[in-house]
Image (cartoon, rainbow, N blue to C red):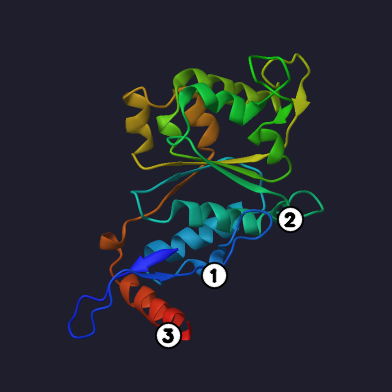
């Protein structure tokens, strides 16, 4: 749920919880039409999304916190086509790399086989779950460099191995990654492997913060007024 506050008395109604529509069965709820704004920056961003959506190229999205990186990732997925079928009809899987403990991240991404370690079961990793669709790696610069190396190998070889298994599993997942720090600064600070950066940034999208495209404020205000008045 999202929250807004009315600050002007006597109309103050604080902490009103407002529902948002549920995500689809494949994990997405946003499309290109949900990207509100008519500024030059927003028009250019939408044009780029339309140009790249039909390819399988990896996409790296850079933007400050709150600029809508996941919205952009979902918009790309929902426009995607895979051969004669639509990638949009396949899963969109998101993982926030900063929210997963380092010792669990590898098993979550690649899966496990029973007996690999105490308590391990036969379980798909997110690369398998996203097969045919899109895997969105949010805040990838927070990921431990050793796991980054394994992701790089999986992307290059287009296959993964579950932890504890020697059997390769072919994967076809489009990789979209996101950072809230400038990518080359992450590379210089050793937060992001240089070789993984080049593999993931085949297409790079920069999302300008709202303060740099203030004309979009009016479009956003109109949208939310209409949206919440309907509710």
For marks 3 and 1, give the CA distance: 19 Å
Q: Secondary structure at mark 1?
A: helix
Quadrant where the N terminus sits is bottom left
Instruction: Note whether 159 is above or below 91 in the view shown.
Output: above
- The percent coordinates of residue 118 (x first, y second) are 63, 15
- Tell me the tag on residue 89: 2
**Seen from this angle, which residue lies furthest right?**
84
- Tell me the tag on residue 175: none
Q: Secondary structure at mark 3?
A: helix
- Mark 3 or 2, closer to the camera: 3
The residue carrying pointer 1 sits among few (fewer than 14), some (14 to 19) or many (20 or more) residues within 10 Å by Cα, namely few
Instruction: Note whether 19 is above or below 175 in the view shown.
Output: below
| Horizontal side, residue 122 vs residue 206: left or right | right
Instruction: Note whether 140 is above or below 226 in the view shown.
Output: above
**Seen from this angle, which residue lies furthest front?**
119
The first of marks 2 and 1 along the sequence is 1
- Mark 2 or 1, closer to the camera: 2
- Tell me the tag on residue 33: 1
Instruction: Note whether 201 is above or below 54 in the view shown.
Output: above
- The percent coordinates of residue 115 (x first, y second) are 71, 15
The residue carrying pointer 3 sits among few (fewer than 14), some (14 to 19) or many (20 or more) residues within 10 Å by Cα, namely few
Residue nearer the viewer, 132 or 41: 132
**Count of marks placed on residues:** 3
Labelled pair 2, 1 in contact (Cβ < 8 Å): no
For marks 2 and 1, give the CA distance: 18 Å
- Mark 3 or 1, closer to the camera: 3
The first of marks 3 and 1 along the sequence is 1
For marks 3 and 2, give the CA distance: 32 Å
Report which residue position mark 3 lands on. 229
Labelled pair 3, 2 in contact (Cβ < 8 Å): no
The first of marks 3 and 2 along the sequence is 2
């Amino acid at each position: 749920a999202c929250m807004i506050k009315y600050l002007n008395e006597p109309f103050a109604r604080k902490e009103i919880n407002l529902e948002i529509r549920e995500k689809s069965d494949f994990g997405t709820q946003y499309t290109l039409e949900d990207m509100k704004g008519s500024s030059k920056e927003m028009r250019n961003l939408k044009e780029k999304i339309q140009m790249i959506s039909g390819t399988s190229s990896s996409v790296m999205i850079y933007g400050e916190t709150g600029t809508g990186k996941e919205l952009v990732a979902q918009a790309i997925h929902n426009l995607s086509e895979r051969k004669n079928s639509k990638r949009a009809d396949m899963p969109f899987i998101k993982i926030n790399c900063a929210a997963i403990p380092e010792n669990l991240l590898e098993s979550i991404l690649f899966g496990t086989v029973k007996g690999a370690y105490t308590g391990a079961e036969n379980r798909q990793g997110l690369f398998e779950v996203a097969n045919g669709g899109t895997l969105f790696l949010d805040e990838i610069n927070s990921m431990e460099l050793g796991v980054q190396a394994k992701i790089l190998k999986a992307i290059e070889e287009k296959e993964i191995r579950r932890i504890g298994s020697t059997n390769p599993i072919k994967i076809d997942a489009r990789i979209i990654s996101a950072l809230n720090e400038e990518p080359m600064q992450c590379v210089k600070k050793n937060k992001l492997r240089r070789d993984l950066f080049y593999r993931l940034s085949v297409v790079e999208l920069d999302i300008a913060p709202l303060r740099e495209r203030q004309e979009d404020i009016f479009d956003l205000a109109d949208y939310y007024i209409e949206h919440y008045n309907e509710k």
